[in-house]
Image: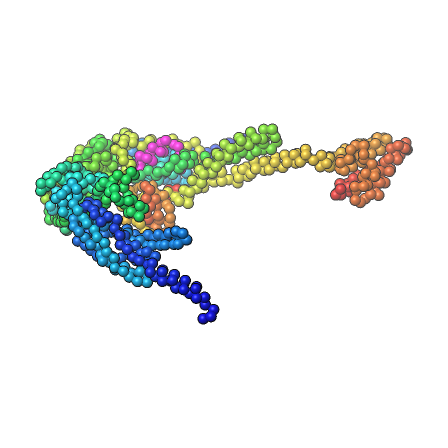
Amino acid sequence: MTLLRSILVVLLLAAVPSMAQEEAFRQAGAAYDNGHFAEAVLLYQQLLDQGIDNPELHFNLGNACFKDGELPQAILHYRRAWYKTPRDPDIQANLRFALHAAGAVEPSSGITGRVLSSLSREEWVLLAGAAYVLVSLLLLAACFLRPARRTLLKWTLPPLALLAISAAGFHAWRQLVRQPECVVFKTGATALFGPMEGATAHFQLPLGALVRQRETDPKGWTEVEYDGKRGWLKDDLFERVSP
Amino acid sequence: MRGFNPVLMVTLGCLLAASAFAADVQMTIDRQLISLLDRAVLKIEFIETQGDAVDIPEIDGLEFHYQGQSSETRIVNFKSSSKTVHTYVVTPTKVGDYTIGPVLCKFKGGQKEVSTQLRVIKPADDPEAQQLTSIMYSRISTDRDAPFVHEPFGLELKVYLRDGVQIDGNFGIRGGLPESGLDGELQWQVAGRARAEISGAIFNVYTLRSTAKALTAGTFTFQPQVQLNIVIPRQNRRSFGFDDPFFGDLFGRQETRPMVLDCNRLDIAVRPVPLAGRPDSFTGGVGSFDFQVDVGPSRVRVGEPVTVKMRIYGEGNLEKIMPPSIDDGLDFKLYDVRTVPSQNPDEVRFEQVVIPKSDAVTNLPPVTFSYFNTLTADFRTITRGPFPLAVEPGPQLAAQVIATVPSTIPQATQILGHDIVYLKPPPKRWILRGDAAWHERQAYRLLLALPALLLAVGAGLARRRSRLAGDAALARRQQAPRAARRHLQRAEQAVRNGDAAVFYEAAWAALADYFGHRLNLPPGEVSLQAVLARVPDGKEAIASLFETVEQRRYGVRADAGASEMNALLRQLADTLRRCERMKL
């Protein structure tokens, strides 16, 4: 009985912080419902500061920021939520909505890019693991079942292909770390042809535009890609979105 | 001089002299009688020598165009001949008798003056024409004498061709246009073809039109050259060789002749948009425009976006017009204006999202567009609004926002949705940012190694099994210690039971099975001789064992004590262990 009681106490203590977080989450939702968007932003932000990194939190914070008129922050959090659950239609819808409201172009990618971003990084890892286990088991069976060896080896091809695709998907997500996405946080951001003050202006970026970092310059400049064009921006004009 | 052969000297001298005399220069023309619309091919041939192209002196009524150099070498009856040819096309512009040259041609070993004759006559169907410019010419004109900067003005280029002159319908406009100050390159379109009577002669008149826009004030000069291809019947007496720079059609019935027509000079004085009277709301529009503004939705809550759609349409520099600005005061949060792609080339559309900050807002202030009217040469201002807005406090429900697709996608306005999707419920599990993802944990990585390990072990086992199946000697070698161990255990049991007969049988079986498997011997062929023949050392011990066990098997002493059996068992086990370590 003593052991059972101890286990119950430990479980209860472990549940206390999560209950507090859930309470804060609900309070933020209530503030949002009452039209107190700034307060909702604050409450969601507090949860974020506690280290919570759920896509639901980023999504709701994005909503609160959007309603509070802070489009760049909204886009930033929608995108962060999208990284974790890229097939969530709500996140996709709100991200598109916010981007269009900001007058920004949606990040475009070809068919390959769309396929590779249809699963999150964790999902690609899971798929790759499953394919790897399947390939191993089939090869193991092929070692011992000599008569069926040819058939078993043929069966390893689909999981091998899946493994290759998963590796490509994982690599695509890894690229987001090396060449991160950023959100333009200041109005009048103009991308220049070169990384220096006074360089020729190339194109303008609307507030909230999602850009992809390509090169960096030690003097505080970053080459970004937006809508198929590349130009240099000062580092203080945008904020990193990618993990 | 004794060593020289006089015959050889004479032959060599003759050859040198002959080669010196063989070098020559000739000027030839493929036809010496051509019509005004025709052209001739002139060649300067350096025979048995080489020489550079020469400048043909200018002749009023003829134009010369150098086409290039070619070389020719022939070997006939072991005798070689070569020549270098420079080709020129002669284009007549007037009728008359002409002498081309004399031209001084320098070559290796000498120089020579050459000349030829050419007669140009009137075209057969146009007895009046004396020169080319009376048969074909072009004229350029404009619809605006003094346009303003950024104001589009039309250019019209008319090409006059005397009836009977045929062309292939392609026109090229080259040179004669301002090098800078114009907005983009001029795009000429053939606007039509008509027949007209000019000075009693019938002309076919082709009209080409283009629109120009000046970016700066000043005088712009237009004097383009029109290039066209005249189609003329092929002359039967002419031959078409590869050295001819022009070729006829596939069947050789006709040929095209490129012709460049000069044009009159057109000066256009472009006026600047005046600074005086320029309103603050002027955004660069020059032309004649109208302005339309739509605002929606008109009923929103605080924080909800309102879209202001502006449309400017008319004639003028639409693509240069900057969007009119909205005076927001402090009541609205304004987002960047974006240009909306439009299918209509005579309009430009802008959209701007504004968000009312408080419920005190009752309307969106008027939007003003000013432009310079080129027809009346003054500034015009068009004001639309104010636009009533009903702004309510509190949370919004379904604010309708019309969003558009920006960028280069040629798409009309698109309704994306009415509002953002509502909040998500609390998650079932809270994820902490510092937590390592499951796939980054050590346990998962170790787990990942398991299938590979299993596969490696399985592959090893399968390989071993395969080897044993294919190698009977190896398979028996593997069985040897196991078989010996089994019999030794039986012998131990016999010692414990005091059964000497079973013990010696078991000892023999251990020896026979071990060496039978180890040496891959058939069951009946295990003998001391066979074993000793293969064992490298320890032969004495093996022989002693074999003999002892043999003797005891067939002459079993009932009184064989346990100590003797134990000693023999130990000796047997030791010997077999030593043999196991031997390489047989």
Quadrant housing the C terminus of chain B: top right
Residue B107, percent across and down? 31, 60
Q: How many numbered marks are there?
A: 0
Q: Residue at horizontal 82%, vertical 41%?
A: B532
Q: Is residue B210 left or right of residue A57?
A: left
Where residue A59 appears, as percent x and y from the top left, is 36, 35
Visual colour scheme = rainbow
Measured as percent of width and height from the top left, residue B306 is found at: 23, 35
Q: Which residues are magenta?
A: A81-100
* Residue A181 within the magenta-colored segment of the rendering: no
Residue A24 shown left or right of residue B487 in the figure: left
Could you tell whether B313 is left or right of A54 in the image? Answer: left
Location of residue B398 by image quarter:
top left
Q: Residue at x 79, y 42 (%)?
A: B535
Q: Is residue B316 something that shows in the picture?
A: no
Quarter of the picture holding the N terminus of chain B: bottom left
Is residue B465 visible in the rendered image? The answer is yes
Question: Which residue sits furthest bottom?
Answer: B1
State the image quarter where residue B454 is shown: top right
Q: Nearer the viewer, residue A215 or B152?
A: B152
**Residue B198 percent coordinates (x, y):** 10, 41
Kindly report the secondary structure that dominates the magenta region of the rendered protein. helix
Camera-side residue of B211 and A243: B211
Identify the residue shown where x is 39% and y is 32%. A87
Out of B459 and B278, give the one closest to the viewer: B459
Q: Quadrant of residue B152?
A: top left
